[in-house]
Structures are given as C-alpha cells and as structure tokens.
Image (spheres, rainbow, N blue to C red):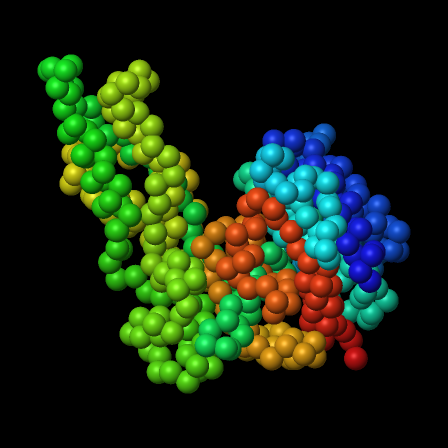
Amino acid sequence: MMNSVSTLLSDYIQIDTSTSNGNEKKGLLYLQSLAKSYGLYTFYHETTSTKGNLIISIREEDLQPFNDAVYEINNKHQGARFSNPPTVLLSHVDVVDAEEEDWTHHPFLGAIVDGEIWGRGAIDAKQIGISHLLTMKNLKGMPLKQPLIQVITSEEESGSENGLKRLLSDFPFLWDDATVWNEGGGFLIEIEGKLFYLVETGQKGNMSFTVLLSPKKSTNPYLPSNEVDLLTFRVIDSLKNLQLPDEVLPLSVVKMLTLIAKELKVDFSSNNYKSILKNIPTKYNRMFSAMLKSTFTLTKISGGRKNTEYKGQYKLAFDARPLPGTQTSSLIKIVQETVKNIDPTAVVNWISTNGGYDLGISEEMRVRLEECLKLSGVNACVVPFMTIGSNDGRYFQPFKATVLGYCPMTPEITFDQIIQRVHGVNERISVKDLEFGIDQLTMVLEKTLKVY
C-alpha cells in the first residue's frame, strides 16, 4: 500500500488550500475524482465559487437525502432525512498558512523523504481526509447497518462559515443522533511504560475578549508616568492566574484520570485529582493542566505612549478556554470584576463566547478501540480526552450527535512529538502512521457497522 498511500497524500498536499489562498474547491475536486475512481458516490455542496463541502458515500441511496433536501430547499420545504442516524467521517480541506523559507522541504511540495510525507496538512488534516477515503474504499460492498458518509469541509481553520456551518444549515435534518468520527485524537501518551491512546470526546469553550485600559497622562514628558504600564501587567497577571469558583471536572477528564490510575495501580479520587498528577511526565504537564481548569491567555498587546491610535492606552486581547458546563454569564461577570478591581474605568469587550462540550464515550466503543489496537499488536488503554483546542466537532452539538476524535498512529510517535508539528514548521507524517490509521479505522467501522 505504501506507494499508493504516500502518493495520494503527497498529491493532496501539493494542492495549496491554505487560508490565505482561499481555493479549497481544487482540493475537494481532487478527492471527488479519487472517490469516483473507487466506485464511490459523491455530492458537491457549493458555498462560494472557490469553496464548498464534499460528501462521499459507499451506497448511492445514502446520497438521496441530500438530493431530496436540495429539491425541498428550492421549494421552501426542508424535511429530508436518513432512514437511520448516519456515521460521518469528518475532515477539512483547508490548512493554515506556511512560510517556505522556514521549512526543510517546501510546505506544498508533498515531498516523500525517508518514509515520511512532508507538507502543510500532512497531519492537520489532509492525512485524515485520505485515511477516511481509503477506509470508505476498503468498506465498499460491505452490508451496512446505517448510512456511512464522508464529509470534507472548507474553512475549518477560519470559522467554517462557508464550510460545515453552511452544510448543517442547508441540510439541517440529516444529522440527528449521528456518530461523527473527527480529527483531534488517536494520539499516544506513555506513562510509566504504559501506553494510552487519546480519543477526543469533548472540547473546552472558545471565547475571546479585549480589555482597553484607561489612559494615564503624564504632566512631564521627560519624566513619563508608568502607571498604565503597571496596570497592564497587573491585569495580565490577574487573568492568567484567575481561578473560577466551584469548577467541576468534566466527566471525560474524570474518566481519563480514573483509567490511567487503574493502569498505574494508584489511588484516584475526583475530589483529590492532583494526587495522580505526580505520576504524569513533565512533557504532558501543560496538556493535563489545561484540562483541569478554565484558562485565560494573552494573545496580543497594542498601545503604549508612542502609539497614536491608542493615545497612551493599552489594548489587550485574550483567549479564554472555559471548561464545559461553565456558565457564560458567570465567566463574563468574574472577568469584568477582576479587571475593574484593577482599573475601574477599563472597557471589556467580548468578541466571541462559544461554549464547550463533554460527551464521553460508551464503554462498548472504548473497548472496541482497544481490541482493534490489539489486533495490530498494540497493547494499550484507550482513554477519553478533552482537547484544549477547537474544531468543527462542536457544531454538531445541537443535533445530539456523538463526536469522537480518533485517527490513531503507531506507538512510534507520541502526543508531545505530534503537537509540535500541527500548525508548525516541517509538518510531516510517516507512511507507517498513515497506513496504521487506515487499518484501524477500517477495523473499527467494520465491527461497528457491518450486518452479520
């Protein structure tokens, strides 16, 4: 499989679908052509002249609801549905920008060097699109319990307005109770010699706001006041260390820590979760810490005495990642009070307030993932995981869908190595990791969907 798989991903990477380029359609048409060559069925959902979403199915009848929905939308009726809740393989065609001079190999050349495919999207998320497509090819002809469709979207990296949001809006009756296999998981962590595969079952919220501090004019230009500078540092430090009261650990995190404690044979209680953290390797500290509390991060600082736009003021931009279940109104109130206690006339402006979610994973599915790993010679514990980032999975929540982030790689590469490559310089994936993910997804879906 090596040559065909590596070439497919290499060719896909060579189609520049970066956010600044804006031409995702070329990548979608490439996948559509491949799907048709495998005898699969496709539906292209155009949202702009250069963007859209691609739906691929094994059975022709599984595309009929999309065709029915188009007819009903045009006739002001929207009611097309699947006969049973679908299983959805979700990925996105767009990638973040990359600067050629920073890379060892051109980010859009798709170079194959020493068994690795290099380029922007090699992990996030073109490898997932190829993995899903070849999984669909492997399952073609298999009798299915329910519809199985692959969905590749545009604009995931820049808001999804002309991508998944538009797809869900135009076809709102097709996603109820769906099971969505998404990006964001399948990564390995190793603790005290034990292997743990992460499956994303939740996401923290994604909020952003700005703080405009009060101007503090100096009466002497030769001896300027640094009062506004001190206020700025105090605000940054207070928000960085802000602890929301009565935060409750998400169930996914409790389950994750419980499973890890069981494997390590250490005591664990959700009321004293810090007891297990001493067993966690230092390289994972940031990931675990972020899952345990709501966090506030400074992303931009503008202003100063010589900035004519702000006239001596400072404007701070923050990224807030609240735990699922955090009340937005309470968070806003606490942030306001924290800032106002330092600078009573400061102005806090909220830009976005997207909440998180915490779905968990059924024990049946979790064990099935472990069994499939064992069939490939990997003895590991699969644990739920709440990502500190965000992706398109959050938009399925109104449909009561189950969203699982999982596309595993071999035990040869661990989470701390992968995370440096996602959106980073020299992004790449080994052919072995790519093949491993395809084999695992094929096994999992066959065990889940096949009619015996």
Quarter placement of the N terminus = bottom right
The residue positioned 54% from the left and 58% from the top of the image is 417
Question: Which quadrant holds residue 108?
Answer: top right
Q: Residue furthest left?
A: 219
Count of labels in the image: 0
Looking at the image, residue 76 sits to the left or right of residue 366; the answer is: right
Quarter placement of the C terminus = bottom right
Residue sitting nearer the eye, 76 or 341: 341
The residue positioned 41% from the left and 79% from the top of the image is 261
Looking at the image, residue 413 sits to the left or right of residue 58; the answer is: left
Give percent across and percent down for residue 287. Answer: 42, 59
Question: Which quadrant holds residue 57?
Answer: bottom right
The residue positioned 44% from the left and 81% from the top of the image is 264
Looking at the image, residue 143 sits to the left or right of residue 288; the answer is: right
The residue positioned 82% from the left and 71% from the top of the image is 143
Residue sitting nearer the eye, 342 or 48: 342
Give percent across and percent down for residue 26. Answer: 76, 37
Above or below, 120 relative to 198: above
Question: Which quadrant holds residue 18?
Answer: top right
Give percent across and percent down for residue 322. Answer: 37, 53
**Can residue 242 be seen in the rendering of this structure?**
yes
Looking at the image, residue 193 sits to the left or right of residue 224; the answer is: right
Above or below, 277 relative to 54: below
**Can residue 168 be seen in the rendering of this structure?**
no
Give percent across and percent down for residue 14. Answer: 74, 40
